Amino acid sequence: MKAIQYLIFALVACAVILCAGCTGTTSPSASPAAGQTASTTDLAPLALTPADVPQNFTLVSAEARDPAAVGTLARDLGWQEGYTARYTGPAGANGLKGEIIQSIAVYPPANIPNMIAMADKQDRADTDLEYTDISMGTANFTGKGFTGKAPAGLYIKPTNVNPLVTGSEHHDVSTALKADVAEIAFSKGSIFEVIRVTGPSATMETVTTLAEKAYAKIP
C-alpha cells in the first residue's frame, strides 16, 4: 500500500514540473507599462563640443531637459524632449563672465516657426539693450536672431518708489551690470535650437559661427 502511495506521489510531482516548464517556455515577453514611450531621438550628439566653441570656454553642463521643468506653452506646442549645453568663458571689462547656452528641443515641424518667433520676441524683453537683427538667410540655413548691446558701465535705473507707501518722496535707484547678448534660433526637420551668447564674446560673428556648427550636426 505504501509503495502505491509513493508511486502516485511521484507521478503527480512529475506532472507539476512538466506543466511548469511548458508554462515558462510559452509565456509572452513583458510589454512596456501603459503610457510609457521610448525616446526616438538622441540629442546628445547634436550638442556643441569644447572644440566647437571659442578658446577659454569651459563646459559646465550638458544634460537632457527635465520634462517636469518644461512650461505649459511648450507642451501645448508639442514639446517632446530637449537637451541643454552650457559653457562659461572669460569675464569682460565689467567683470561679468561670458556664457554660451545651446538649447535643443524636438517639436512637430509645423509648430517650429511659431517657436522661433516666440523665442526671438521673448529674448528681446530687456528694453535696456540696443538690438540689431541678424539675418541668417544663407546657403547653409535660415534662422532668426539678434545682438543686444548693453549700456556702458554701471546701469542705474529708478525703482519708482511710491511715497504714499514709504512716507518719503525720495526715489531709490537700482544699479546693475548688464552684458551684451547675441542669439540665433533655427531649425531642421523636427529639431529646434537656440544658441545664446552673453558677455564679451556676444558678437554676430561668434553666434553665427556657433549656429552653423550646430546646424551641421543635425542629420
Image: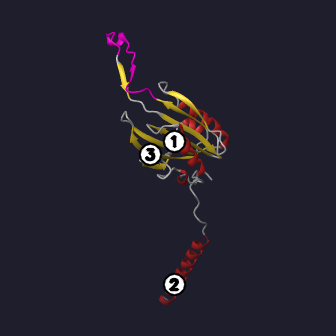
Q: Nearer the viewer, mark 1 or mark 2?
A: 1
Q: Nearer the viewer, residue 68 or 108?
A: 108
Q: Are marks 1 and 2 in contact (CB under 8 Å)?
A: no
Magenta region = 150-171
Residue designated by label 2: 10
Q: Quick check: is 164 in the magenta stretch?
A: yes
For residue 219, above or below residue 197: below
Q: Nearer the viewer, mark 3 or mark 2?
A: 3
- Amino acid on which disc 3 is placed: Tyr
Q: Nearer the viewer, residue 204 or 160?
A: 204
- Specify the label residue 206 is tagged with: 1
Residue at position x 64%, y 44% in the image: 141
Picture quadrant where residue 26 is located? bottom right
Picture quadrant where residue 111 is located? top right
The residue carrying pointer 3 sits among few (fewer than 14), some (14 to 19) or many (20 or more) residues within 10 Å by Cα, namely many
- Amino acid on which disc 2 is placed: Ala
Mark 3 or mark 1, which is nearer the start of the sequence? 3
Residue designated by label 3: 87
Mark 2 or mark 3, which is nearer the start of the sequence? 2
Q: Quick check: is 83 in the magenta stretch?
A: no
Secondary structure beneath dot 1 equals helix
Q: Main secondary structure of the magenta part?
A: loop
Residue at position x 36%, y 24% in the image: 175
